[in-house]
Image (tube, rainbow, N blue to C red):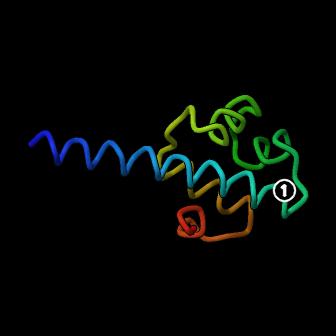
Amino acid sequence: MTERRNYLNNWMIQASKLVGANIAKHRKKKGLTQEQLAQESGITSEYVSRLENQKENPTVNLLERIAKALSIEVIDLFRR
């Protein structure tokens, strides 16, 4: 059971890093500031910063809104 929990914890950490990095990458590629992405996604710029720095775990609903604002699919936030 402990091995499984460790595996899941490690997977969540890696997913958070990947999502955060991809939000920043796609935001910059689209030429948006954190403030602009926040406004288009219905969140604060501080929250965008926390997402990009892996300090928050977004909900699926929020990932959908962010992806829409970035004109990408949610799966793109999980691509290496």
Seen in the image, is 27 located left or right of residue 4? right
Report x, y in % for residue 26. 75, 61
Query: Does residue 26 lie above or below 6 as drawn?
Result: below
Q: Is residue 44 left or right of residue 65?
A: right
Q: Quadrant of the N terminus?
A: top left
Within-10-Å neighbours for mark 1: few <14, some 14–19, many 20+: some
> What residue lies at 55% left-to-right and 48% top-to-bottom?
17
Tell me if 33 is positioned left or right of 40 in this view.
Answer: right
Instruction: Residue at 66%, 52% (x, y): give it.
Output: 21
Q: In which image quadrant can residue 71 be found?
A: bottom right
- Residue placed at 62% from the left, 39% from the top? 51
Q: Secondary structure at mark 1?
A: helix
Query: As displayed, is residue 45 above or below residue 62?
Result: above
Circle 1 is placed at which residue position? 28
In percent of width and height, residue 73 lies at 60, 71
Q: Position of residue 23 (x, y in %)?
A: 68, 53
Q: Is residue 10 above or below residue 67?
A: above
